[in-house]
Image (cartoon, rainbow, N blue to C red):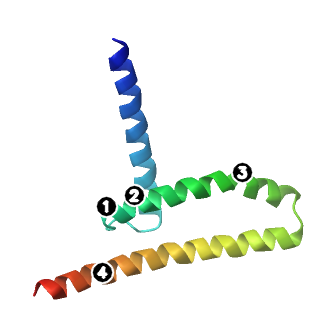
Amino acid sequence: MAFGNKEDKQRKKEEEQARKIQKILDKYELGNLSDEYARAVGNISSVLAGNSMIEFGTTLSGKAEDVAKLTYFNALVQQNWILIRQMDEISKKLDKLIEK
């Protein structure tokens, strides 16, 4: 019985992680991303999520310079999502050319 509970918890945890990754992929229009890159995006987003509390605290009590840095950092992160999507599209197109 204990095995079932532990396995159920693990399965639920994995399903929740998959939902979070899919939510991020949808948010940044990365739905067609290759599976290996989708997992990497999930790992990246987990790391960035850890920084969100620091960001929130800095926004509330930080100096204008700190808030500006966070704003620029967020813009860079957004640009990186776009680059990831574009590079994946290029990779898929190159694969199609090679197959011909």
Kind of residue sitting beneath label 1: Asp
| Residue at the disc numbered 3 | 53
Q: Nearer the viewer, residue 6 or 81?
A: 6
Q: Residues within 10 Å of mark 2 (few under 14, many from 20)?
A: some
Q: Which residue is at 55% across, 78% downward?
A: 79
Q: Which residue is at 88% across, 57% downward?
A: 61
**Is 2 left, or right, of 79 in this rendering?**
left
State yes or no: discs 1 and 3 in contact (Cβ < 8 Å).
no
Q: CA distance from mark 2 to mark 3?
A: 23 Å
Q: Which residue is at 39% across, 31% downward?
A: 10
Residue at disc 4, secondary structure: helix
The disc at residue 91 is 4
Kind of residue sitting beneath label 2: Arg
Q: Is residue 23 above or below residue 87?
A: above
The disc at residue 46 is none
Residue at disc 2, secondary structure: helix
Q: Nearer the viewer, residue 82 or 38?
A: 38
| Residue at the disc numbered 1 | 35
Q: Is residue 47 above or below residue 79?
A: above
Q: Which residue is at 67% across, 56% downward?
A: 51
**Is 60 left, or right, of 76 in this rendering?**
right
State yes or no: discs 4 and 1 in contact (Cβ < 8 Å).
no
Q: Residues within 10 Å of mark 4 (few under 14, many from 20)?
A: few
Q: CA distance from mark 1 to mark 3?
A: 29 Å
Kind of residue sitting beneath label 3: Met
Upstream in the sequence, badge 1 or badge 3? 1
